[in-house]
Amino acid sequence: MINGLSKFGFRMPAEWEKQDSIWITWPYNKRDWPGLFEYIPQTVAKIIAPISEKQKVNLIIKIDEEVLKLKKYLESFSANIKNIKFFKIPSNRIWIRDFGPIYLINKKAKKKVLINFKFNGWSKYKNFKKDNSVNNIISRVTKIKKIDPKIKIGNKKIRFILEGGAIDVNGKGSIMLTEECLLSKIQQRNIGVNREMYEKILSEYLNVKNYIWLKKGIKGDDTHGHIDDISRFVDSNTIMTAIENDKKDVNHNILKQNFNILKKAKNLNGKNFNIIKIPMPRPIFIEKVRVPASYLNFLICNKIILLPLFNDANDDKVIGIFKKFFKTRKIIGIDCRKLIWGFGAIHCMTQQEPNV
């Protein structure tokens, strides 16, 4: 099984497929939101509460956290505590999308495994060792088999580095990713790995065949080009993509170039994707630093969509677009103006566990 899960009928499901739970990490790292940390627990609680109403939340907390106290806090935001399971696991940050488990499923065999890509702090931050060990503990406590992808560089076999926010799949063999994140020499994750090697290893482990390489991510994204801020599959043949209408904004040309690539992209059947344009919110600066505010950093759950909002003129317009598309799911807006100071939003801090 280690040498290519796709041969065994495993695949990475799309986010809208039936889920068992959502993994979330409780915030403790005050340095990720200098001057604004006091607002972060309530934002995270507002994200947990609507998810817990209809499905399970696996909440990672500190070893010494007082669970009773935290339960009362979450209940004050109308969280359904019966649907929240607490896991005492050491972590560095809340961005579990990037270091947490990426699940593969085999529906015929009714089996699920988790892929444990190596995490190295986006090749930017030094405090990541606890985050990189989270999946070892999740695998052990949930009794779900863990696979550690490795790649051969020269004569050496080393752990393959990849973050969940760097990829997006439609569950039908197509994957979106960016050249800036994975092929650039800046914040380089896997030294010596080229496009062909990336495609080979991702095909083996995620069972994807159709690669849509976009160019760059948005300004302010400290991951150096994650896909989940710019373009997302919303069904097997539809992609939502960010558009910046202000020609003077640095994101205008970046997102236009990505849009042009998507217009020409085809699925495995050779058909073009339906493309839905999502406007960008106006630029947000905190302490004179531009942050990566984007509506595309949303989360799809079984019954709801959690959509980041920014008290912007485009908030209502985007809610309308989402309501029109996601007819069977309730759209819930979450004010992310403080959360985004940590350079991530709702999708970055959640990770879905699929159902088999």
Image (cartoon, grey):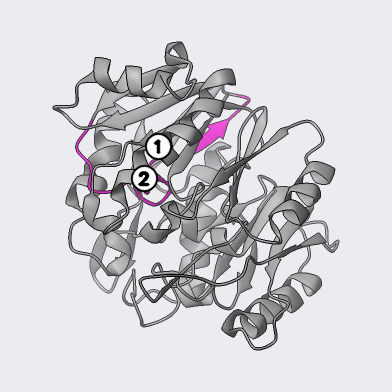
What residue would you read off at disc 1? 42
- The picture places residue 329, in percent across and down from the top left corner, at 73, 32
- The picture places residue 266, in percent across and down from the top left corner, at 78, 65
Q: Does 185 appear above or below 128?
A: below
Q: Is residue 243 visible?
A: yes
In the image, is residue 122 part of the stretch drawn in magenta?
Answer: no
Residue beneath the point at 35% across and 81% down: 186
Q: Does 95 appear above or below 222?
A: above
The answer to whether the residues at label 1 and label 2 have Cβ atoms under 8 Å apart is: yes
Magenta stretch? 89-108
Q: Is residue 143 visible?
A: no
The amino acid type found where label 2 is placed reads Tyr
Residue beneath the point at 42% across and 18% down: 75
The part of the image, by quadrant, that contains residue 41 is: top left
The part of the image, by quadrant, that contains residue 159 is: bottom left
The amino acid type found where label 1 is placed reads Gln
Q: Callout 1: 10 Å neighbours few (<14), some, many (20+)?
A: some
